[in-house]
Image (cartoon, coloured by chain):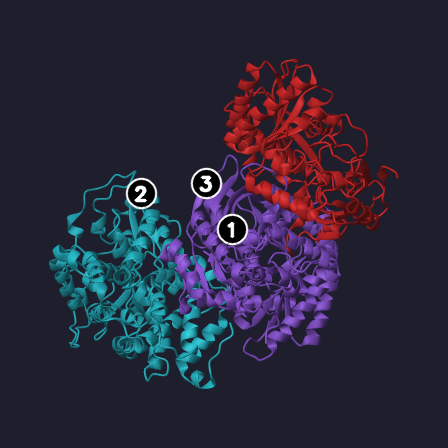
Chain colours: A cyan, B red, C purple
Amino acid sequence: MQTHFSPEQLKESAIERSNDILRACVHCGFCTATCPTYQILGDELDSPRGRIYLIKDMLENNRIPDDKTVTHIDRCLSCLACMSTCPSGVHYMHLIDHAREYVEEKYSRRWDDKAIRWLLATVLPYPERFRLSIYGAWMAKPFARLLPKKLRAMVEFAPKSLPPVSKNDKPQTFQAKTFQAKTFQAKTFQAKTFQAKTPKVKSKTSERPLKRVALMTGCAQRALNTEINDATIRILTRHGCDVVVAKGSGCCGALTHHMGKSDQARATAAKNINAWIKEMDGDGLDAIVINASGCGTTVKDYGHMFKNHPLEEDAKRIAAISKDISEVMGELGIEGASEQGQEVANMRVAYHSACSLQHGQQIKTLPKTLLQKVGFEVVEPKEPHLCCGSAGTYNLMQPELSKQLQERKTNHLKATNPDVIATGNIGCMMQIGSAIDVPTIHTIQLLDWATGGPKPRELNDVIPEEINIKPRDKTKELS
Amino acid sequence: MSSVLIPDDEAEIAEIVSAAKSNNTPLHIVGGGTRTGLGRTVKAQKLLSLKELSGISLYEPGALTIVAKAGTPLADIEQALAKENQRLAFEPMDHRPLFGSKGEPTIGGVVGGNISGPRRMISGACRDSLIGVRFINGRGKIIKNGGRVMKNVTGLDLVKLMAGSYGTLGVFSELSFKVMPTNERQATLVVFGLDIATAIKTLSVALGSPFEVSGATFIPHQDENGDASKTLLRVEGFDSQVSYRLERLKELVQKTIASTSSEIEIIEGDDHISLWQGIRDVKIFSGTKHQVFKLNIKPLDAIAISEAISAEMSTKNLDTKTLYDWGGGLIWLGIEDNEQGQDKVGQSANSHVQTIRSIVNEYGGHVTLVRAPKDVREAVSPFHPEHQIVAKLSSCLRKKFDPAGILNPGRLGADPLSAIAGGK
Amino acid sequence: MPMISMPVPNVEIMSRRDEIITALLSALPAEIVISSESETLAYDCDALSAYRCSPLAVILPRTTAEVSAAMKICHELGVPIVPRGAGTSLAGGALPTADSIILGTARLNDTLEIDLENRFISVQSGVTNLSVTGSVEGDGFFYAPDPSSQLACAIAGNIAMNSGGAHCLKYGVTTNNLLGVTVVMANGEVVKLGGAHMDSSGYDLLGLICGSEGQLGIVTEATLRILPKPEGARPVLIGFNSPKTAGTCVADIIKAGILPVAIEYMDRLCIQETDKFSGAGYPDVEALLIVEVEGSEVEIDLQLARITSIAQKLDPAELRQSASAEESALIWKGRKSAFGAMGQINDYICLDGTVPVSQLAHVLERIGELSKQYGLDVANVFHAGDGNMHPLILYNANKEGDLDIAEKFGADILRLCVEVGGCLTGEHGVGIEKRDLMGEQFSANDMEMQMRVKDCFDPKWLLNPAKVYPLEVSKERRERLQNQMPNNGESSK
């Protein structure tokens, strides 16, 4: 499209970038076909093309954003389905992120809106605070009806239970208390919470580990679910990797970044970068493994986030070795363990492709292939490209739209008649899991189980069709 | 002044029509005169014959395009196409057997009546093969629309409007078609002895298969000669393609009728050709006294509709004969009325039409009275009554194209609005 | 300055803006009326983004009843309406004027009836083209017209433009696959045309509506023919170093009685650019044909054998049959990403003229000459089977004057198409893009006849009035309303 930025405007690097993006857009409208909000609302303004248009107008004219423009921008899920669809390579993600930053800077939100966003930005990236807020939500539940809409949505969305703090990702306080780094030797895990296990798979006996990887332990995920990291650590160590939980690492910055609070986002991201660079320059890292795909997309984009910033080079180095756990397992190669072979083969897995994984990171078939490789029956719901409505904090900020998408997704999933639903992102797990009777767990938990790990406890009540199940082996249970 | 005008070219037609408009002289536009039995009688003394406007102006087999003057005999066109192993995909019906008319059908007449045949079901009607028209409207103006290329969406599509307009909107001078290749081999699978419900369902299953069935017809059993019913599936293509398709269709049919004992035959060669010509031209009514109706319906509705009609007709002690084409989507219905005397014939024809139309109206579709004595066609509307808004639009269009009402007046009824009343 | 002008917005209507919006809001739910300036902005153009103008307001109805109510009011108030499908038109079909109201069909997205036995599907007109096939492909059927924008384009737009696609050589275009519509007239009256049966009774109004570019009525529901999916399909890649030979190859294939389901053509520039992005591995040739045939494995082999022997007689530079599904996908990948690939490196105008197949080589040669004359590159990609060309004129939107040159160049190409016996537009429609060239193809009488037809459907000329016919030609009719309004334009409720 034609753009109308002045030479002065283009001197600013963010505007220059956005200009390039806008110029790539030919206004063809293909993106509308896969945009979840356009499907629901049927309004050009709630489609990527319309948003691009509004953003273009806003930036070109250096306008103070008006309420309506902000509403439409806020409604964007950042699911990035449009990027998968766009035939012209428009980098919508960078554009919408810039727009959010711009809005955060120039638009005066209503006091309650501001307050909620402040609350989310202050609480979610910090697991301890997050836990506290969940306890608060439990207490507020009886009074939920009296709360304003968005707060009510948050209270209702709070999970019914929380796992105990895992020693495997030791909590760190907001005050940047140093975190004890733990290094896990290949095949055995030293800390007392796990039983040492001799893997049934052909062991990769070697003096040195195949890979040395850092595990990003994340933030919200840690509070909500500790099994994912546990499973990740198990499967990686089982396949010959040393897993480092680097001292000083934590939230990747995605949540605050998507709210347009880019300085805050960079602050938390910088901690990660420094922590991991230290490891890279220390004992070395082959990869940074991320098992929350929402975070993975952000970390892989650190180069852009830190453009023209002193940490730019380091950010690029980090981004270059960041991988989703499925990518790493794909590289390592996996096989099904014979012991759980029958159970696995009888299990039908509906694979929910998280937006951040399929669109953000363009990893579409690998997780399915891996699940099939270890023996699961894998099915996919209709409209697999469509977001479940979780989208970071979207389910809290846009409860009505989120609910509609949630319903649509869970209906499609139910229709495949699965025994379990697998996905690569904690947000999706919560969103789908809370609205469907089928156990919804992380892909890595299934892969871990199938390659020799313990059966995920969520599957204990599942009785797939033709199966001759043995009673659960209690010695394998996590304590 | 002669009562037959035979222009040599387009310009002459324009002159004739202009003059006719000024003088308010209605014209009866005629090609080969073989289909004048369709619709109502034209209320005009002067005949405008297109027989001198004959000849193929352009034929490019590699582009699947043929352009011919409106008075070109259909046979000439078909012959030219056959030489290059091509044909008009829509398989136009020859009305001479039905009407007992003489003459040489022209391409203009085919378009004027949107005349198609059994293959219409898969290959589209005449109007779907028609890609360009040149005509003279009722003001004497030469108008063109469409052209000689298949992909053409420039401006309003008057090509479709002109097809089936029975000469009431303009006099064709030149017509352009997209043609299709013929096929190396044609064959028909015949299943004997099915009842109508099984037959229609079987045809539907076959038409939902990937075997490109190009003809799907059900001929009910004939009481007179005791012939079993015939369910027909035509396939065309390269030699091995046809063998493959016949084989697969046979399996499919046997599975659908849940029996391998029904007699199944394959017909090819001359028998095949004459079979389909017979269906195309509805030869079952050739030389008979039946009033013939055409019912365009949703294919599966043929079962219920035929049942309802049988029930009605049996109460009136009338002999009916039917043919189901297009998988059931086209019912040819003949009613042999034993009433004597013009008035009674007219009245009973009227009531037949009302009865059949009211049955079809319940299901959706329309009924055309194709063959009946002249006065019957004056007494009832040969064409299905239109919704008020549609009638208004049709009437308006007629006036725009032919303000003086000189082109084939009366052919479609005195005025479309009168058709609503269902009669006079 | 872009070449195509739009009529000056009617000052009188603009002055009644508030009153018009109030009237709409009194009869329609508030959530379907958009009137704020910041929001109407997003509707100021379709995929022909060089031409933009914010409408007076936007209405997004959800039902036929709402469409009817909206149109009734606009009719009473004398406000022009510009219908909009998915806004993917490349011809500016949905471009509003400042005094007009956009009526979008995006919310009319229900599927109404799927009848596999009778082989039709009924949908509201806002559903996307591809989703129609999506609804029936699980049962072994598909909807044939497949424009390249099928992922996003709406059936409403397909009907308005009589859209085609790569499959139309064998299966026809929208008008050959449309069985019935529910259409709302300019005055709000609702009428059904056609249905699940074949052939119309009386005049073919359905055929008239299809391709009428939103000027005769707004279609809210459509009954579409669905066809059984073929057992399989496979492409073959044939490369030539002479466009003429490529054209001969196409003609020879057709003359041999083979009807491929698609024959696509790409020229060297197109091949080079798309290969960079798609990695399809096309050969470096002047002219590339992708020919696809359908049927069972055996039938496909048979047809491809015949096609390859025909091609071989012409000594092709490359002849590549696909041996697997992956290879087939790869062969198509380049073609399907052609426009996108071009878009990544350049702005472009995509033309849409049709030429007789026999004229392809000559036209390509002429386009080459014009390209040198105008100093702009052209990449040619098109449906060789039916001669529908899509020359992509590459220019720079941010370079002053470039669009002008590109448009002049485009106009010359379209004139050429008409000159050799083709037409201005094969599937995109006239919209505004080819409006001013209508006189190249039609005489004054021809256009007058068409406009008289519109007079029957929309006597007030309120539906998409500034499209299709050159402004001078339609002027009297467009302005007729102002001249006829009682009280000289003052509102009458």
Vertical order, B382 against B162 (above or below): above
Mark whose residue sits in front, 1 or 2? 1
For the residue pair B385 and C387, the one nearer the viewer reads as B385
* Pointers 1 and 2 within a single chain: no
| Place of residue A165 in the rendered image (x, y in percent of width and height, measured from the top left) | 14, 63
The residue at which mark 1 appears reads as: C187
For the residue pair C477 and A112, the one nearer the viewer reads as C477
Side of B381 relative to C245 (left or right): left
The residue at which mark 3 appears reads as: C113
Vertical order, A7 against C169 (above or below): below
| Place of residue B312 in the rendered image (x, y in percent of width and height, measured from the top left) | 54, 19
User: What's under tag 2, amino acid-wise?
Assistant: Asn
Q: CA distance from mark 1 to mark 2?
A: 61 Å
Task: Identify the subunit bearing mark 3.
Answer: C
Of the numbered discs in the image, which one, if any, rests on residue A346?
A: 2
**Which quarter of the picture shows residue B326?**
top right
Q: CA distance from mark 3 to mark 2?
A: 37 Å
Mark whose residue sits in front, 1 or 3? 1
User: What's under tag 1, amino acid-wise?
Assistant: Asn
* Lower position in the chain sequence, tag 1 or tag 3: 3
* Pointers 1 and 3 within a single chain: yes
Q: Secondary structure at mark 1?
A: loop
* Pointers 3 and 2 within a single chain: no
Q: Quadrant of the C terminus of chain B?
A: top right
Q: Secondary structure at mark 3?
A: strand
Query: How packed is label 1: few (under 14 Cα within 10 Å), some, or many (20 or more)?
Result: many
- Asked if residue B182 can be seen in this view, the reply is no
For the point 34% across and 60% down, which residue is it? A326
